[in-house]
Image: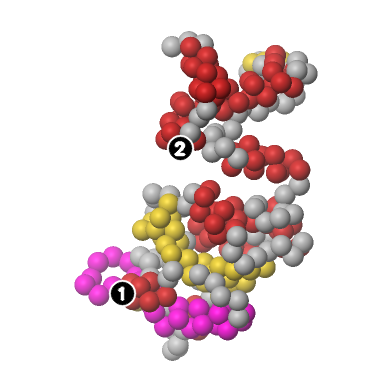
Amino acid sequence: MRVDVISLFPEFLAQSAALGVVGRAQERGLLELHGWNPRDYAEGNYRRVDDRPFGGGPGMVMLIEPLRAALAAARAADPQPAPLIYLSPQGRPLSQAKVRELAALPRMILLCGRYEGVDERFIASEVDEEISIGDYVLSGGELGAAVIIDAVTRLQEGALNDAESAVQDSFEGDGLLDCPHYSHPASHALGNVPEVLRSGNHAAIARWRRQQSLLRTALRRPDLLDEAGLGKADRKLLAEAVAGLEI
Ligand SMILES: Nc1nonc1C(=O)N[C@@H]1CC[C@H](O)C1
């Protein structure tokens, strides 16, 4: 998959993408990352990329022309068509379903805003989709781009090893929250590892983990539980866990 990122700080993405799963995916040729800095296309002595908003008010707005030139350069670099996705709080919330949709694309171009954002005429004319990574305000869209690149890369064939795939599957597979995890030591001043996990009884362990996922989702994210469409066995397992809660 090719990802082009339009950003005033392309080095931010390069550094964050050089690590871990994403770094390894680049080494394996599963991900190709290219940065495009509007400042490289800005005219004039000051190479302006932003200016004051019409109508007054705080902050600055990213100008149309440097963005258009950076986008044109990105599109000219590779004939493969790609949607332009703008990271902004005004976008649709990112979800795993959207990540799966994006991961199936051969290419996408991510636009990272800074300051108050981007001139609305550029958004209306060139942006295919706005995506938000959450209802809060960041200093730039680069963190959103890094989140999308990470989540999408994990779904590229060959990006994850077996252990990492298990983590991916445990959350993504059924839309429930993950169960608790424990490792050594079995006994500790902070508490002991649940006996079932040390029993060697794989059926009991799987049942316990499923029950913990169901209970955790019910307590922390009931909205996800509604979407999960539980079957009879899961509903029974959850009822048993709820009955056992000391309230
Ligand atoms: N939440 C978000 N999800 O994606 N991007 C954001 C976000 O806060 N962007 C900043 C808003 C002003 C500045 O332009 C960049």
x and y percent of residue 13 in the render? 59, 63
Task: State the image quarter where residue 27 is shown.
Answer: bottom right
x and y percent of residue 33 in the render? 64, 68
- Bin the neighbour count of mark 2 within 10 Å (Cα to Cα): few under 14, some 14-19, many 20 and up: few
In the image, the segment drawn in magenta is 52-78
Instruction: Inspect this view and state whether residue 110 appears.
Output: yes
On screen, residue 15 versus residue 231, left or right, reads: right
Q: CA distance from mark 2 to mark 1?
A: 44 Å
The disc label shown at residue 227, or none: 2
Question: Would you say residue 58 sits in the magenta stretch?
Answer: yes
Q: Which residue is mark 1?
A: 52
Of the residues shown, which amino acid type is indicated by label 2? Glu
Q: Nearer the viewer, mark 2 or mark 1?
A: 2
Q: Work out whether 85 lies above or below 44.
A: above
By what rule are the colours in the image chosen? secondary structure
x and y percent of residue 126 in the render? 42, 75
